């Protein structure tokens, strides 16, 4: 999907999300990964702190708007990330990587088995022999459908501007797809209300679908970024796939 319209909201919601950074950083250190490729690198939320730790980062991203934010963020942080505009389902870089990562649900934008297969072929072609592919996903969670809700996302700016994010979900359990409509309400310091309506479509992977998809890899599954078991109460699944 085209993330351009969501780019500003993504920055607002997740610029400070850090739960996964230490995990990817520890993994890169353990593997002594000279170079890392991030798929769906977005705003550089993960690539930038990894680059700061000394890893040579390449970030592949489909949305020009996200890429622009990523480049700006890297420049203002004074770190080098090679951002590449491209599609995870169809790319070939000029070198292979010992580690390919896809943090924070980037793979939930592979909406069909054919998308998954195409992406996996590219990942394999861009992984060094002995390389590792690691990613995390939300575990399937079909919540309340058709109920407008506020999940505590209120953002206050120093000039008094207040933004509240409301959301409404449509669920297609058979297709494993959740479509979230965001109602982003902004009240200016002059008490003027404006509403932006945005849509995000994500497709859940199931456990056995993952196992079948990655059947050529040795797999480790975890239920969080601290290495705990994947259980019924896990919100994320964290996957390390070794060639
Ligand atoms: C949930 S965001 C995650 C961004 C980043 N990985 C992070 O952890 O903050 C998903 C990103 O994947 C990108 N994306 C979606 N489909 C893609 C594709 N086929 N190829 C490359 N990037 C894609 C989106 O544009 C978006 O920036």
Image (tube, rainbow, N blue to C red):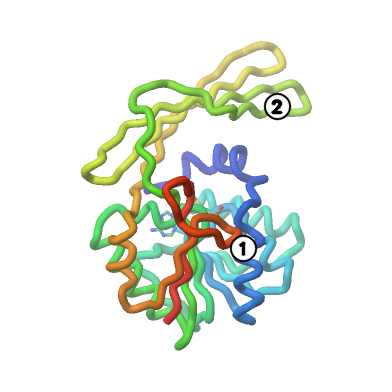
What is the number of the mark on residue 56?
Answer: none
Can you name the residue that lies furthest to the bottom here? 129
In whole angstroms, how far apart are the C-alphas of marks 1 and 2? 30 Å
**Residue at x 71%, y 16% (from the top left corner):** 189
Q: Is residue 106 above or below residue 134?
A: above
Q: Which residue is mark 1?
A: 23
Quadrant in the rendering for residue 129: bottom left
Q: Is residue 69 above or below residue 78?
A: above
Quadrant in the rendering for residue 216: bottom left
Can you name the residue that lies furthest to the top here? 191
What is the number of the mark on residue 156?
Answer: 2
x, y (%) of residue 142? 35, 37
Would you say 220 lies left or right of 115 here?
Answer: right
**Residue at x 68%, y 59% (from the top left corner):** 74
Say what secondary structure mark 2 lies in: strand
Q: Quadrant of the C terminus?
A: bottom left
x, y (%) of residue 120? 34, 70
Disc 1 + disc 2, Cβ < 8 Å: no
């Amino acid at each position: 999907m085209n993330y351009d319209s969501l780019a500003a909201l993504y920055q607002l919601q997740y610029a400070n999300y850090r739960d996964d950074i230490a995990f990817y950083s520890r993994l890169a250190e353990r593997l002594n990964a000279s170079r890392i490729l991030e798929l769906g690198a977005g705003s550089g939320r993960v690539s930038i702190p990894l680059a700061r730790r000394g890893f040579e980062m390449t970030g592949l991203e489909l949305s020009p708007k996200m890429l622009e934010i990523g480049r700006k963020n890297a420049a203002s942080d004074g770190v080098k990330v090679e951002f590449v505009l491209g599609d995870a389902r169809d790319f070939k870089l000029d070198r292979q990587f010992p580690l390919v990562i896809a943090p924070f649900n980037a793979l939930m934008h592979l909406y069909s088995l054919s998308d998954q297969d195409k992406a996996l072929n590219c990942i394999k072609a861009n992984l060094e022999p002995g390389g590792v592919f690691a990613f995390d996903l939300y575990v399937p969670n079909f919540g309340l459908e058709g109920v407008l809700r506020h999940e505590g996302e209120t953002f206050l700016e120093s000039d008094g501007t207040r933004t509240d994010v409301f959301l409404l979900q449509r669920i297609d359990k058979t297709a494993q797809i959740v479509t979230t409509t965001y109602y982003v309400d902004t009240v200016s310091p002059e008490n003027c209300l404006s509403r932006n309506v945005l849509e995000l479509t994500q497709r859940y992977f199931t456990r056995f679908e993952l196992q079948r998809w990655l059947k050529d890899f040795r797999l480790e599954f975890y239920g969080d970024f601290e290495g705990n078991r994947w259980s019924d109460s896990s919100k994320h699944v964290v996957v390390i796939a070794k060639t």
